[in-house]
Image: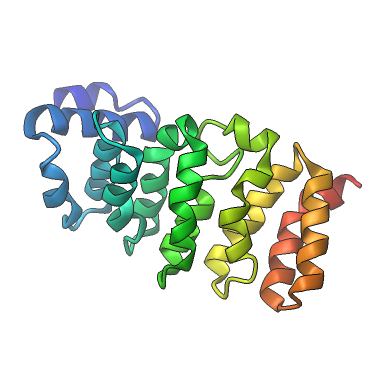
C-alpha cells in the first residue's frame, strides 16, 4: 500500500504495472486466475499487466492467457489487455500476426477487435511498431478478414489501424481502400475506408 501511495502522482499505466509487480512478488502468477473473476475492472486490469510482465512465457502462451481479458465485459479491461502484451507483440510482430490472424474468425467481436487494436502501427498510449509502420502489408492476414466486419467496434479499430498506416504509407492505404471498395461494396467496408482515409483526405 505504501508503494502504491508513493506512486499516486504517476501516470495510470505506471501505477497499473506497479500494482501488477507487487502482487506478482507476493502471490505469483497463480493469482491471475483469482483476479480474473474480481468485481473491480481495475483489479482485472492488474491481472493483465501481470501476464504482460511474466517471464519465461512464449508469445503463444501469453496471448492465450490474455484472451479472457481481451473478451472482458468492461472496455477498460479490454484496453489494458492489449497494452499489457504490446511490448511482446512489438518484439515479434511476425509471430503475433500469425497467431492473431486466427482471432479474426472468433464469434466475439471483442476478440476480433483485439487482433486489430493490438497490432496498430502507431497505437495510443503505447510504443509504435516500427516494422509495421514501414511494412503495414505484413498485417494483411489480420486486416483482410476484418474488412467487412459487421461490428462497428471492429470497424472503428480497422479504420484507425489504416489511418495510422496512412501517416507513413498513404499510397498503400489509398490503394488498399480502393481495392476493398471494388471487391466489397458493403456499408461496413465503406465505413472502414472512410475512417481509414480521414487524415489523408484532410491533408489532400
Left or right, 131 with respect to 195, comes to: left
Residue depicted at x 55% and y 40% = 124
| Picture coordinates of residue 36, whole percent (x, y) | 19, 53
Q: Let me know if residue 118 appears in the view.
A: no
- Residues 11 and 134: in front is 134
- Residues 75 and 105: in front is 105
Left or right, 12 with respect to 91, comes to: left
| Picture coordinates of residue 48, whole percent (x, y) | 29, 44
The number of discs equals 0
| Picture coordinates of residue 51, whole percent (x, y) | 26, 39
Q: Which residue lies furthest to the right in this view?
A: 204
Indicate whether 114 appears above or below 57. below
Residue depicted at x 83% and y 62% = 178
Left or right, 12 with respect to 115, comes to: left
Indicate whether 17 appears above or below 153. above
Residue depicted at x 66% and y 36% = 133
Which colour style is shown? rainbow
Residue depicted at x 58% and y 55% = 141
In which quadrant will I find the N terminus?
top left
Left or right, 76 with respect to 126, comes to: left
Name the image quarter holding residue 190: bottom right
Q: Let me know if residue 143 appears in the view.
A: yes
Indicate whether 202 appears above or below 86. below
| Picture coordinates of residue 101, whole percent (x, y) | 49, 56
Q: Which residue lies furthest to the left in this view?
A: 27
Amino acid at each position: 500500500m505504501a508503494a502504491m501511495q508513493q506512486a499516486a502522482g504517476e501516470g495510470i499505466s505506471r501505477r497499473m504495472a506497479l500494482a501488477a509487480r507487487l502482487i506478482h512478488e507476493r502471490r505469483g502468477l497463480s493469482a491471475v486466475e483469482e483476479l480474473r473473476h474480481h468485481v473491480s475492472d481495475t483489479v482485472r486490469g492488474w491481472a493483465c499487466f501481470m501476464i504482460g510482465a511474466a517471464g519465461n512465457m512464449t508469445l503463444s502462451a501469453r496471448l492465450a492467457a490474455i484472451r479472457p481479458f481481451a473478451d472482458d465485459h468492461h472496455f477498460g479491461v479490454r484496453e489494458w489487455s492489449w497494452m499489457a502484451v504490446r511490448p511482446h507483440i512489438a518484439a515479434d510482430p511476425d509471430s503475433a500476426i500469425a497467431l492473431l490472424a486466427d482471432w479474426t474468425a472468433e464469434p466475439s467481436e471483442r476478440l476480433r477487435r483485439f487482433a486489430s487494436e493490438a497490432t496498430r502501427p502507431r497505437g495510443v498510449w503505447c510504443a509504435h511498431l516500427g516494422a509495421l509502420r514501414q511494412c503495414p502489408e505484413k498485417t494483411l492476414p489480420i486486416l483482410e478478414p476484418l474488412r467487412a466486419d459487421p461490428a462497428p467496434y471492429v470497424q472503428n479499430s480497422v479504420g484507425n489501424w489504416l489511418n495510422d498506416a496512412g501517416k507513413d504509407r498513404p499510397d498503400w492505404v489509398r490503394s488498399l481502400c480502393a481495392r476493398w471498395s471494388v471487391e466489397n461494396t458493403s456499408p461496413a467496408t465503406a465505413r472502414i475506408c472512410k475512417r481509414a482515409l480521414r487524415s489523408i483526405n484532410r491533408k489532400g
